[in-house]
Amino acid sequence: MNDKAWPRVLPFALFMAVIGLEEGLRFMDGKAWISVQDSTFALLYPLRPLVAGIALILCRRTYTELRWSDLARSSHTLVSIALGLAVFALWVNMDWTIGALSEPPGFNPGIFPDPGLRRVMTVIRIGSAVLIVPIMEEIFWRSFILRYVINPDFTKVPLGTFTWNSFLVGAVLFGLAHHFILAGIMAGMAYSWLLYRTGSLAQCVLCHAVTNLALAAFVLNTGKWWFW
């Protein structure tokens, strides 16, 4: 992996490694090899944004394609916000069960008996979904993967270059990284379209963050934790 690729892969890889650790512990718990309470699994969650956030900070100078000044372009920003809300609406209102790997465990802070801990974990969950995950995933999927599929020497591919192959491969892989596969494919297509439309990775981050913020508000108000 070249010196331009690993900073874009590392935050996502660390985030997924913590998920792998959680799934491994759940598997061993299911086999009665260990005994772990659900609240203990949930306490591992802050490790995800922590390791990814540290990696993003350490590598921040390499993300030259992420220009926050792009958000000052109001016409593009309005499109990003509207698209983020549309992705959220589709995610929660359409039947994606045929594309689900399994029933997702969700994240329910109610499993913590202490009110203070519930609040802290809820804030961490929202902060991760709105601040860390959109940056981490858009750098990995839209900046790296979409270009890498076109040319492994991805820095030679201008950001936002469209090919059907990269568009479809990127969307499918993005979907496979989520419990609701079809919903993930839909979202991946939407965020990639926004990149082609605006040429801005920052707009993709904003759009993704709007989706996740709306989803957090929805889950907290409805108790439909499986969406979280």
Image (spheres, rainbow, N blue to C red):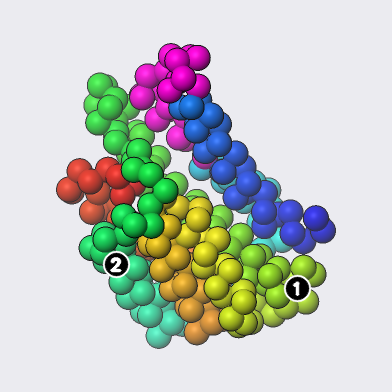
**Residue drawn at point x = 75 percent, y = 73 percent:** 151
Q: Position of residue 6 (x, y in %)?
A: 74, 54
| Residue at image mark 2 | 90
Q: Is residue 14 above or below residue 146?
A: above
| Residue at image mark 1 | 151
Q: Is residue 227 left or right of residue 24?
A: left
Q: Position of residue 192 (x, y in %)?
A: 51, 74
The circle drawn on residue 125 is: none
Query: What crowding class fits label 1: few (fewer than 14 Cα within 10 Å), some (14-19), or many (20 or more)?
Result: few
Residues drawn in magenta:
28-48
The reply to whether the magenta stretch includes residue 137 is no
Q: Nearer the viewer, residue 91 or 49?
A: 91
N-terminal of the pair, mark 2 or mark 1, is 2
Q: What residue type is disc 1 on?
A: Asn
Res. 118 image quadrant: top left
Q: What residue type is disc 2 on?
A: Leu
Q: Secondary structure at mark 1?
A: loop
